[in-house]
Amino acid sequence: MSIEKRNLWIMWICNFIIAASMTMVLPFLSLYISTFGDFSAEYVQRWSGFIFGVTFVTAFFMSPIWGRIGDKYGFKPILIINGLGIASSIFFMGFMHHVHGLFLLRLFMGIVTGFIPTSVALIAKQTPKKEAGETLGTLQMGTVSGTLFGPLIGGVMADTFGFQYTFIITSLSIVLATGVVIFGIVEKSHAGRNDTKARPSRTAVIQLILQRRMLVSVMAIAFIVQAGLFSIQPLLSLYVSELTKADSVAFLSGLAFSATGFGNLLLTRKWGKLGDDIGYDRVLMILLVLAAVLIVPQALVTDLWQLVILRFLFGMAVGGMLPCITAYIRIEAPFELQGEVLGYNQSFRFLGNVVGPLIGGIFSGYMGISSVFYVTGFLFLLAFGLLWWSMKQSQAKIREIY
């Protein structure tokens, strides 16, 4: 087996562990906050959005820095630092007793939240352009699989062992994944990586991005998509509790989370391969429309099983978005700058992770949780319009040249 394939499958396994560990806490985050005191539903919803989104504030600033360091020194050291940092943050979350402490830990965690994005940069840089969509789709299957089983595992553990032990077990799982990286990953060195004189400044890299309209548009779409996806995430467990009177709300919330993962896992690799064949921008347009069509009915469900089915279908649509966006950037960005350019794209996604929960918290507080699904549908249609306009502009520019 080649080093590239070996790295791919190792990172697949590690991303599975990291994603599962990090998503274990998502189904019961709002429920965990409720244990800190006798709070109103509006208070819990608001702080759920703040605490969930604040991690991505510091991650927004750190992502391009990690990418730039990775281009120069390699991505493996960054994976190790991020893995151990995430594990430490989650471990201490289990000992918090007030929202402000949890808020600060999530804020600190944003500094080292780059494990999965860094793994994407590592694999993208070693992958031929013509195979980028399929390979990155394969890698995302590891993340999706972890996201799929993580909420179920976390829900069961929370109901069985309590919140504190779930945080502790989660942190130990991340340490295990970091150990696999230390002893398993072999990163190839590339000529010119350490040539600091030949490397453009940060300002030059930003100017390069701004000069390519489609590249800017794709990053903006990544922001909009993430904002849409994360607008409902912190509130989903509360929405589930409104749909059912069962006692095991944490487990059922995990089931609702995982339904999206099942659909995502089913078609992620196929969407990436289709992007290799017909173009990543075309596939992305199709997926944005499908996502908008499938998210709105989730506001109208009256039973949990209806929500689970719609989340499954929705997952099938959103599964190909990240591989297509990343593969497009892999093609457009110069080889020696791919880590940094992908870092800026990740910053846009992290910004969406911040804005999304804030939007969800605000709209749910004033108009109820169901209103968030309508807002999300609008965001996907907005992203579709931006992509359609950018493609038209690019085609017009090509006609002017020729």
Image (cartoon, helix red, strand yellow):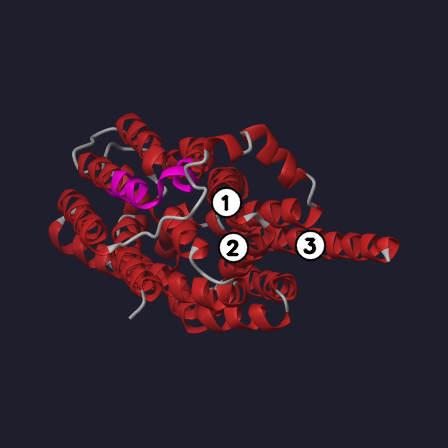
Where is residue 85 drawn, in percent x and y?
25, 37
Dot 2: few (<14), some (14–19), or many (≥20) neighbours within 10 Å? many
Q: Is residue 38 left or right of residue 41?
A: left
Tell me which amino acid carries mark 3.
Leu
Q: Tell me: residue 380, above or below residue 77.
A: below
For the magenta stretch, what is the residue range? Answer: 69-83
Contact check, label 2 and label 3, Cβ < 8 Å: no
Where is residue 279 drawn, in percent x and y?
63, 66
Which of 10/244 is in front?
10
Q: Earlier in the sequence, mark 1 or mark 2?
A: 2
Q: CA distance from mark 2 to mark 3?
A: 15 Å
Q: Which mark is residue 326?
A: 2
Contact check, label 1 and label 2, Cβ < 8 Å: no
Give the labeled residue for mark 3: 387
Q: Residue at x 35, y 33 (%)?
A: 111
Which secondary structure lies at badge 2? helix
State whether the magenta stretch is mostly helix, strand or loop.
helix
Residue 46 shows up from this direction: no
> In the rendered structure, does residue 396 fall within the stretch colored magenta?
no
Dot 3: few (<14), some (14–19), or many (≥20) neighbours within 10 Å? many
Q: CA distance from mark 1 to mark 2?
A: 16 Å
Give the labeled residue for mark 1: 336
Q: Residue at x 62, y 50 (%)?
A: 218
Which of 190/215 is in front?
190
Q: Earlier in the sequence, mark 1 or mark 3?
A: 1
Tell me which amino acid carries mark 2.
Thr
> In the rendered structure, does residue 70 fall within the stretch colored magenta?
yes
